[in-house]
Image (tube, rainbow, N blue to C red):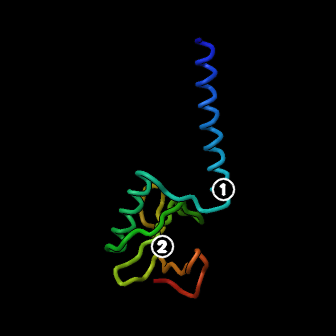
């Protein structure tokens, strides 16, 4: 009985690792969305920078930023706030992504 329990527990651990690896591999080519407390802290920092609005997306950053948070401002404009690993603002710019995250004409906010 004890041997069967160890095998069952091992199978659960392997399944969890395989699932995590699959999720990581899937996210590798795409933007990795923020979740949990990281999302909450990054969102709060971005909203403090913009003076309000609503978070419409947040992901692991690139080009030197740890996090990138998309915020829709009260006037309808969309901006992207770039944060470092300590949630300090590195900068912000107009988010010129159109539908399905395709870039459209735009510039800094």
Residue count near mark 1 (Cα–Cα under 10 Å), binned few <14, some 14–19, many ≥20:
few
Q: Nearer the viewer, residue 19 or 66?
A: 19
Residue in front for this viewpoint, 12 or 59:
12
Q: Position of residue 97 (x, y in %)?
A: 55, 78
Q: Quadrant of residue 13?
A: top right
Disc sitting over residue 28 in the figure: 1
- Quadrant that contains the C terminus: bottom left
Q: Is residue 96 left or right of residue 18?
A: left
Eye-nearest disc, 2 or 1: 1
Q: Residue at x 46, y 70 (%)?
A: 70
Dot 2: what SS?
strand
Label 2 Cα crowd, 10 Å radius (few <14 / some 14-19 / many 20+): many
Tell me: 19 left or right of 60: right
Q: Secondary structure at mark 1?
A: helix
Which numbered marker is on residue 80?
Answer: 2
Q: Position of residue 95 (x, y in %)?
A: 51, 78
Task: Identify which residue is drawn at 48% across, 60% down.
Answer: 84
Q: Which image quadrant for residue 98? A: bottom right
Between the residue at mark 2 and the residue at mark 1, the CA separation in whole angstroms equals 21 Å
């Amino acid at each position: 009985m004890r041997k069967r329990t160890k095998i069952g527990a091992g199978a659960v651990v392997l399944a969890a690792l395989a699932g995590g690896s699959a999720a990581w591999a899937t996210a590798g080519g795409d933007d990795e969305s923020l979740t949990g407390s990281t999302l909450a802290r990054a969102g709060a920092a971005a909203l403090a920078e913009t003076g309000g609005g609503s978070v419409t997306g947040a992901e692991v950053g690139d080009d030197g930023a740890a996090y990138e948070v998309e915020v829709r401002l009260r006037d309808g404009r969309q901006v992207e706030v770039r944060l470092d690993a300590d949630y300090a603002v590195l900068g912000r710019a107009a988010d010129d992504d159109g539908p399905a995250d395709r870039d459209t004409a735009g510039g800094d906010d």
